Amino acid sequence: MMERTGIASAALLAYRRDLLLALRHWGQVAQPLIFFVMVTTLFPLALGPDLSELRQIAGGTLWVAALLASLLGLELLFRADHADGTLEQMLLSGQPLAVLALAKGLAHWTVCGLPLVLLSPFVAASLGVQFEAVGTLMLSLALGTGVLSALGAIASALTLGLRRGSLLLGLLVLPLAMPALIFGARAIDMSIHADSARGPLLLLAAMLVLALTLAPLAAAAALRISAE
Amino acid sequence: MNWTWFHKLASPPHAYRIASRLAPWFGWPAFLLIAAGLYGGLVLAPADYQQGDAFRIVYVHAPSAWLSMLVYGTMAAAAAIGLIWRMKLAHAVAAASAPIGASFTFLALATGSIWGKPMWGTWWVWDARLTSELLLLFLYAGVMALRASIDDRDRADRASALLAIVGVVNLPIIHYSVYWWNTLHQESTLTKIGKPSMAGDMLWPLLMMLLGFTLYFGAVLLLRLRAEILRRERDASWLRSEIGR
Amino acid sequence: MTEFLNMGGYGAFVWPCFALAGFVLIWNVIAASRLHAAARERALQRAGAGEGGR
C-alpha cells in the first residue's frame, strides 16, 4: 500500500529540490548578487566619492539596488518548472498548492535574498555606512527581501509563459513593493543617524507576516490561472 | 428564492439591452450636475481667502481623485465577483472600468500638479496625496498591461482580476505608508467631521461635481460595457435582430 | 469678462485644469462610442459569416 506524502514532507521536498537545482546552476544564482553590487557602485560613480554625502543616500540606494536585484532573481522562481512541466505535476499532485508555493518562495529567498543580506554590510561600507548601523541594515534587508520574494511570487505566477514577461513582472511588483521600500529605507537611514529604527522595522515585520500569510494563497490561485 | 432575474441579467443580450437603456439615465443627470457645478464653482463661489481664485481647481481635482478610487474599487469588486462566481459579465465590467479609472487618475495628478505650482511654488511635490495617486496610476497600468499581454481572454480576465484584488488589498497599506512618509498636503476638505473648511457657497458646487462625475462614470461604464459584451460574444446572432442590418 | 478669465492672476493655472478635465470627460465618451462601433461591426460580421458563409 502506498503511503500518502504528508504536507510537511511535500513542502520539504519542494524546498530541498529548489535548493539543489539552484546550487547546480549557481552561476545563475550569482547574477542578481553581482547586479546588486554593480548598481550600488553606480551611485558613487555618479554622485562623487564623498562618503559623508553617500551616507545620506545609502539607505535608499541599498534598498533600490536590492529591489532591482530581487526582480532579476524572480526569474528563477517558477519559470523553469513551468517550462519543463514540473508545475503541472505539482498542480496534479493533490498537495495544497499554497504550501508548495510557500516552500518554493522560501527556497527562492534562501538562494536570492539571504546571500544579498549577507553581502550587504560590505556593500554598505562602500557607501559610508558605519558599523553600528549594520545590524539594522541586515534586518531591514532580510525582512524586505522576504516581502519582495512573496510579492514577486504572485507576479511571477501571473506572468508565466508570457512574451516579455520579465518586463511585465517588474511593472507589477514595483508598485506593490513601494510601502516596504519606504519603511525599509527609512529604517536604515534612522540607524545611520543613530536613531532607533524600531518603528519602521516593526512595520516591515508586520508586512512580512501579512505577505507570508496571503501571498502563497494568491500565488497558488495565479498558478492555476496561468497553467490552464 | 427565484434567481432567474439575476441569471437573465447576466445573459449578454439582456445585459446589452439594459446597458443601452440605462446609460442615458446616468448621462443626462451627470451632464446637468456637472454644468451646474461648473457654474457654481467658477462663477458663483467666492474666491478663497488664502488661495484666491486658484482654489477653484478643486472643482475638477477632487472629483477626479474621488473617481480614481471609486473606479478602482468597482474594478476590484467586479473582479472578485468574476473570479468567485465565474460571471463573464463581471469580468467585462472590470475590463471596461480600468481605462476610465486610469484616465481620471491621470487627470487628478495633472490638476493636482498644476494646482501645486501657484500654491507651493513647484510643479511637483512628493506629498502624500499626489504620491498615492501616482502609485494608483501604476496599479492601473499594471492591470491594463497584464490584460493586454495575455491572448487567451479567459486567462486575461482571471489574471487581471487577481492582480486587481491584490492591488486593492495593498491600497490601504500604500495610503498609510505614503501618508506616514510625508504630510504636506492640505487636509481633506470633506472628511473633516464638524466644521468643514469650505464655506457653504463653495461646498455645494463641489458636491454637485462629485455626484455629477460619479453618475458620469456610470454612464461611460455602461457605454464601454456594451462594447465589451459585443467583443466577448461568440454567438452574435441575437445582434442582428437587436440592432438590425 | 477679462476679470473672469484672469481668475485673480491664476488664470494660467485654472483654465488648463478645466480644459484638461473637459478633454478627459469628452475623450471617455468618444472612446467608448468608437469602441462600441468597432465591436458592433466585427460582431455583425461574425454573425453574418456564420449564417451566410457556407
Image (cartoon, rainbow, N blue to C red):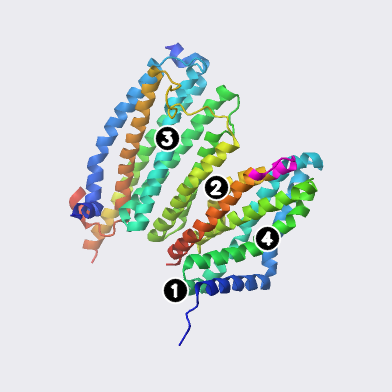
Q: Residues within 10 Å of mark 1 (few under 14, many from 20)?
A: few
Amino acid type, label 1: Gly
Up-down: is C37 above or below B190? below
| Residue at image coords 25%, 49% | B15
Up-down: is A83 above or below B134? below
- Contact? badges 3 and 4 (CB < 8 Å): no
- Mark positioned earlier in the residue sequence (2 or 1): 1
Distance, label 4 to label 1, CA atoms, is 30 Å
- Mark positioned earlier in the residue sequence (4 or 1): 1
Chain that bears disc 4: A
| Residue at image coords 52%, 65% | A101
- Asked whether the viewer can see residue B118, the reply is yes
Q: Which residues are magenta?
A: A188-198
On-image quarter of the N terminus of chain B: bottom left
Amino acid type, label 3: Trp
Amino acid type, label 2: Pro
Q: Assess whether residue A190 is covered by the magenta stretch.
A: yes
Q: Which residue is mark 1?
A: A94
Up-down: is B133 above or below C40? above
